[in-house]
């Protein structure tokens, strides 16, 4: 155990979902492989052509609210995205180290909030497959707020709803742009989750404390 987190200084723990608690491989597979395959079948075109069209469409929306809106993508591609997600949801996986970490937070009576850009429908699909929900006092979706976590507006609403003290909060995310916005908003303790997808290797952040596994910040009681 190191001192990446001084737990006595933390009352509020704010956690991202995809890539942080859950294996981002699910989302990468879903959007980059499964949805293009369905689109190719729908349009009767080669999968490569479908991928080119969809990837270009995704690129326009990265970091924007539409990116997270499964209904937007249903309309845009003419596919039932929630239904498709349901159909492969048995692939949703929790990262190793997450459950012991959440148990620790519960034991320590920390206020725990899930702060996600994912649409609430996606949150519901995923949390119906993995038993994480009981650990959260709050679940806030960017789509319900009307701003993604990349916007300061999201943080203002989240603070209002949770009532967190910025100086006594820890926020963990696998996206450095979002961590930077949280830092600008004034969240004092920030951690970058390096290991987001089980299929992708990433370097630690140059600007934020980084962890590969939550075990690195979960105290072990003797
Ligand atoms: Mg994430």
Image (spheres, grey):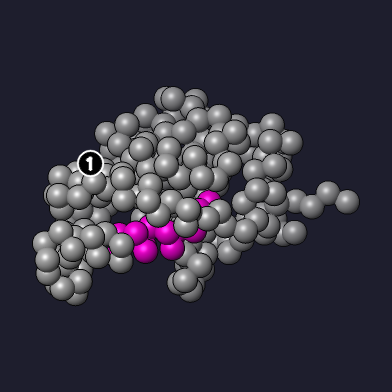
- Residue drawn at (24%, 65%), measured in percent from left and top? 37
The residue lying toward the viewer, choosing from 129 and 139, is 129
> Can residue 210 be seen from the camera position used here?
yes
Q: In this view, does 133 lie above or below 199?
A: above
**Mark 1 = which residue?**
71
Disc 1: CA contacts within 10 A as few (<14), some (14-19) or many (>=20): some
The residue lying toward the viewer, choosing from 186 and 83, is 83
- Residue drawn at (63%, 39%), measured in percent from left and top? 10
- Residue 112: horizontal and vertical position, in percent? 57, 35
Q: Main secondary structure of the magenta part?
A: helix
Determine if the magenta segment contains residue 7: no
Q: In this view, does 153 lie above or below 6?
A: above
Residue 88 image-quadrant placement: bottom left
- Residue 6: horizontal and vertical position, in percent? 68, 47
Q: Please indicate whether residue 196 sits to the left or right of residue 77 in the image.
A: right
Determine if the magenta segment contains residue 30: yes
Q: Please indicate whether residue 205 sits to the left or right of residue 213 in the image.
A: left
Q: Please indicate whether residue 102 sits to the left or right of residue 51 in the image.
A: right
- Residue 61: horizontal and vertical position, in percent? 20, 53
Find the magenta span and give its range: 21-32
> Can residue 65 be seen from the camera position used here?
no
- Residue drawn at (59%, 33%), measured in percent from left and top? 134
Q: Which element carries disc 1, helix, strand or loop? A: helix
Quadrant, the N terminus: bottom right
Number of labelled discs? 1
The residue lying toward the viewer, choosing from 186 and 31, is 31
- Residue 213: horizontal and vertical position, in percent? 61, 61
- Residue drawn at (69%, 31%), measured in percent from left and top? 109
Q: Please indicate whether residue 177 sits to the left or right of residue 100 in the image.
A: left
The residue lying toward the viewer, choosing from 134 and 178, is 134
């Amino acid at each position: 155990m190191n001192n990446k987190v001084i737990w006595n200084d933390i009352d509020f723990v704010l956690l991202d979902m995809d890539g942080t608690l859950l294996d981002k491989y699910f989302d990468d597979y879903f959007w980059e492989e499964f949805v293009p395959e369905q689109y190719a079948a729908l349009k009767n075109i080669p999968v490569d052509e479908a991928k080119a069209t969809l990837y270009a469409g995704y690129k326009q929306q990265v970091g924007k609210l539409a990116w997270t809106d499964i209904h937007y993508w249903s309309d845009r591609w003419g596919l039932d995205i929630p239904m498709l997600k349901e159909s492969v949801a048995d692939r949703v996986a929790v990262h190793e180290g997450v459950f012991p970490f959440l148990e620790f937070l519960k034991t320590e009576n920390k206020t725990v909030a899930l702060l996600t850009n994912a649409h609430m429908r996606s949150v519901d699909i995923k949390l119906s497959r993995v038993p994480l929900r009981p650990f959260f006092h709050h679940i806030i979706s960017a789509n319900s707020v009307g701003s993604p976590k990349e916007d300061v507006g999201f943080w203002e609403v989240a603070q209002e709803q949770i009532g967190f003290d910025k100086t006594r909060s820890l926020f963990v995310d696998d996206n450095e742009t979002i961590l930077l916005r949280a830092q600008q908003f004034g969240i004092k303790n920030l951690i970058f989750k390096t290991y987001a997808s089980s299929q992708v290797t990433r370097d630690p952040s140059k600007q934020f404390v980084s962890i590969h596994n939550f075990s690195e910040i979960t105290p072990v009681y003797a």
